[in-house]
Amino acid sequence: MTNREAGINVVRDMMGDQAAAKLSASADSNTFGAPIAAYAVDQVFADVWTRPGLDRRSRSLVSMSVMIAMRQPHEFAIHMGAGLNNGLTLKKSRKFSSRRCHTLAILPSQQHWLLLPRLSRSMVWTSTKTTLATAACFDTKRRPHCRC
């Protein structure tokens, strides 16, 4: 079995006959996206999705995490459908997705807010003085020879 055949079989298992036929036709065409489709079939689906170590359900969870992190809702929906075909349940997917959204959206913003108390008044004042001094340098009527 060639990589192309193995990849199309994985796509068929995960996304159905229609998606497999579309991806296969795209990979075999001479269109602009053909090399990308061929790479997806031959490398991603035939190689990565069939490696030992992780089952497809776990790989789907990883892919869904990446799609959430990259803010790709369309791709997330595709991987969600594939995940359901790979053994995920809606309940598990909902729980997983809400946890990923918390981790990837709320926590990073909280980390930024936690840094604010570390800024001392002197840092803020120094920054403000520098900004005011720079603005004053552009006032050529009062400081015509400033070289800041």
Image (cartoon, rainbow, N blue to C red):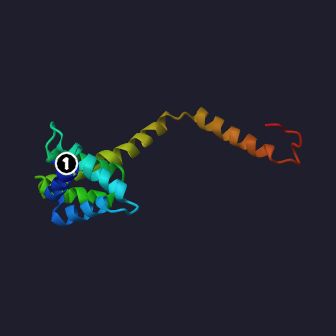
Residue nearest the viewer, comparing 37 with 106 = 37
Q: Is residue 25 left or right of residue 5?
A: right
Asked where in the image residue 23 lies, by quadrant, the reply is bottom left
The amino acid marked with disc number 1 is: Thr
Residue at point 74%, 42% (across, down):
134
The crowding category of the residue bearing disc 1, from other C-alpha atoms within 10 Å (few below 14, some 14 to 19, many at least 20), is: few
Residue nearest the viewer, comparing 80 with 130 = 80
Mark 1 lies on residue: 2
Residue at point 27%, 63% (across, down):
25
**In the rendered view, would you say 29 is above or below 138?**
below
Query: Can residue 55 be spotted in the picture?
Result: yes
Residue nearest the viewer, comparing 14 with 104 = 14
Q: Residue furthest bottom?
A: 18
Q: Is residue 26 left or right of residue 8?
A: right
Secondary structure of the residue carrying tag 1 is loop
Which quadrant, please, contains the C terminus?
top right
Residue at point 20%, 61% (across, down):
20
User: How far from the left and from the top, in percent, is residue 72?
Assistant: 34, 56
Q: Is residue 136 left or right of residue 79?
A: right
Asked where in the image residue 146 lies, by quadrant, the reply is top right
User: How far from the left and from the top, in percent, is residue 135?
Assistant: 75, 46
User: How far from the left and from the top, in percent, is residue 99?
Assistant: 24, 48
| Count of all numbered marks drawn on residues in the image | 1
Query: Can residue 99 be spotted in the picture?
Result: no
User: How far from the left and from the top, in percent, is residue 68?
Assistant: 31, 52
